[in-house]
Image: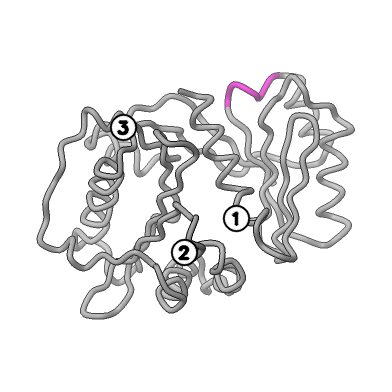
Amino acid sequence: MIDTIDENFNRHARQVPERTPGMIVNELPGLTYVDSGLSCDTFNILHISNGSALSAATLEAAVTYYRSRGLDYCIWIGREQLTAEVGGFLQQAGVSRQNEEVGMILDLGDYAIRRHPDHRNVRIADQPDRIADYARVLAHNWTPPDQNVVRFYARTAPVYLASDSDIRLLVYYQEGKPVATLELFPSDAETVGIYGFATLQDFRGRGIGSTLFTFALNYARSAGYRRVILQASEDGLGIYKKYGFKAVTTYYEYA
């Protein structure tokens, strides 16, 4: 299950940039790193996927890539890959731990479909204006809103809208106003990950997030996926456990 989560995370970081002109994905032994063309650590992700294959020189080369271009970036690594040796490589590269999240998984066979009348307020972003709505809501995760998020989705919209795309960007509308978002990102026929889950500050505490979340789980089960994965902050652990998610690993962010 840990490999399943790691593979979904890696594909999520690189798949859309790989298909977007002007964005670059580099793969070196033990890691993948993404240059979105924006100085934004939300999308410029260096993912250490195989600590045993990693060398200090390889990590240094990837970090130097970002620094030489003046790009913000972040490094993500799962607990199982963070050996003492890899920890030493990170220290040599001059980065430090900034954050950690819990990798969780839900067996959809244990999830019962939940109906809610407000599910009708959720729309799949299947046209440019809805992708723009998704981006504007997500940008408000930062203060002030991060316009690099808006730029990223403006550039990548053709990838999400392509006829062969199975990524689903969901937007919750309250009286016509986009107020919450969630992304369903599949890495194989059985596994889908949840990303970009956000609600505007003024609309929190109204049950909008949980309504959007159950819509997403219902959609995933109806679409035939067998498992859902996500990365949770400490604050979200209890909520996700109520839906049946189980903690299986920890991810660490360095910058």
Q: Residues within 10 Å of mark 2 (few under 14, many from 20)?
A: some
Residue 60: where, in percent of width, then height? 86, 39
Q: According to the image, label 3 marks what residue?
A: 245
Tell me the residue at 55%/46% (across/down): 12
- Element type at marker 3? loop
User: Which tag is nearer the camera, tag 1 or tag 3?
Assistant: 1
178 in the magenta segment: no
User: Which tag is nearer the camera, tag 2 or tag 1?
Assistant: 1
Vertical side of 216 occupied by 92: above or below:
above
Q: Residues within 10 Å of mark 3 (few under 14, many from 20)?
A: many
Comes first in the chain, label 1 or label 3: 1
Q: Report whether 43 appears left or right of 128.
A: right
Q: Which mark is residue 141?
A: 2
Q: Quadrant of the N terminus?
A: top left
Q: CA distance from mark 2 to mark 3?
A: 24 Å
Q: Report whether 95 appears left or right of 223.
A: right
Q: Amino acid at mark 3?
A: Phe
82 in the magenta segment: yes
| Magenta-drawn segment | 79-83
Tell me the residue at 33%/32% (across/down): 226
Q: CA distance from mark 2 to mark 1?
A: 21 Å
Tell me the residue at 81%/54% (across/down): 66
Q: Amino acid at mark 1?
A: Val
